[in-house]
Image (cartoon, rainbow, N blue to C red):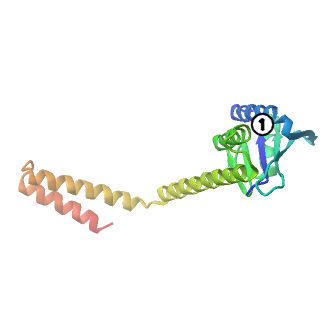
């Protein structure tokens, strides 16, 4: 389960939304967290928030939340440095999530740390790990679906279209909306097309 969460943001609209959520969180948990900031060359600002959480194991857990921000003209440098597909982004364990998913995780984190429903480290960390796993699985399924669609042979689409035409032809024939000779000719043509693909 994650003990460190890293957020990355620039100056776009979604990044601004992310930063607003995280700033709100920092304000609300200031009594149980240690916050520090530093600049890193060439143009990154890093805010580190160390949050102390009670634990059911009798010892206290620390969750570290790191926030990297860069101006718009250094956004590509930030993305290259951390292997990000886009910003805003968040890294939980080995998984990186971008865009609306990053905002969703920030929002979840805010709720988890400020609501009374989750009161210990185990619950909070388990929830974050589960949320990250769920997003990762959804992304994998979406990617697999996209690959299947992209790699679907043209012939299979063509065959499906011919089958649908053949089915419509059979229906017209049964309903006596087409004469026998036309039906036989069209059916033969469709069957030949199917046999040749």
In this view, 184 is above or below 67: below
Q: Mark 1 highlights which residue?
A: 10
Q: Is residue 46 visible?
A: no
**How would you rate the neighbour count of disc 1 (Cα within 10 Å): few for under 14, some for 14-19, many for 20 or more?**
many
The answer to whether residue 184 is left or right of residue 72 is left
- Residue farthest along the bottom direction in this orientation: 195
Q: Quadrant of the C terminus?
A: bottom left
* Closer to the camera in the image, 105 or 122: 122
Q: Quadrant of the N terminus?
A: bottom right
Q: Is residue 180 visible?
A: yes
Asked which secondary structure carries label 1, the reply is loop
* Closer to the camera in the image, 192 or 149: 149
Q: Position of residue 57 (x, y in %)?
A: 78, 58
Residue for point 66% across, 50% down? 127
The answer to whether residue 106 is left or right of residue 143 is right
Residue for point 71% across, 40% down? 106
The answer to whether residue 63 is left or right of residue 162 is right
In this view, 22 is above or below 155: above
Q: Position of residue 154 (x, y in %)?
A: 41, 59
Q: Position of residue 62 (x, y in %)?
A: 83, 50
The answer to whether residue 179 is left or right of residue 166 is left
């Amino acid at each position: 389960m994650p003990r460190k969460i890293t957020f990355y943001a620039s100056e776009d609209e979604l990044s601004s939304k992310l930063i607003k959520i995280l700033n709100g969180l920092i304000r609300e948990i200031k009594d149980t967290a240690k916050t520090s900031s530093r600049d890193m060359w060439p143009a990154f600002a890093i805010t580190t928030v160390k949050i102390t959480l009670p634990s059911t194991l009798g010892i206290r857990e620390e969750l570290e939340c790191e926030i990297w921000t860069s101006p718009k003209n250094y956004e590509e440098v930030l993305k290259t440095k951390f292997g990000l597909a886009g910003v805003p982004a968040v890294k939980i364990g080995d998984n990186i999530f971008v865009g609306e998913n990053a905002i969703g995780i920030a929002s979840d984190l805010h709720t988890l740390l400020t609501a009374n429903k989750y009161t210990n480290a185990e619950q909070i960390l388990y929830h974050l790990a589960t949320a990250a796993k769920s997003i990762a699985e959804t992304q994998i399924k979406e990617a697999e679906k996209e690959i299947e669609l992209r790699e679907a042979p043209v012939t299979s689409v063509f065959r499906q279209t011919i089958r649908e035409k053949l089915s419509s032809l059979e229906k017209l024939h049964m309903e006596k909306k087409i004469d026998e000779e036309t039906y036989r000719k069209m059916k033969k043509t469709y069957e030949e097309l199917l046999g040749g693909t």
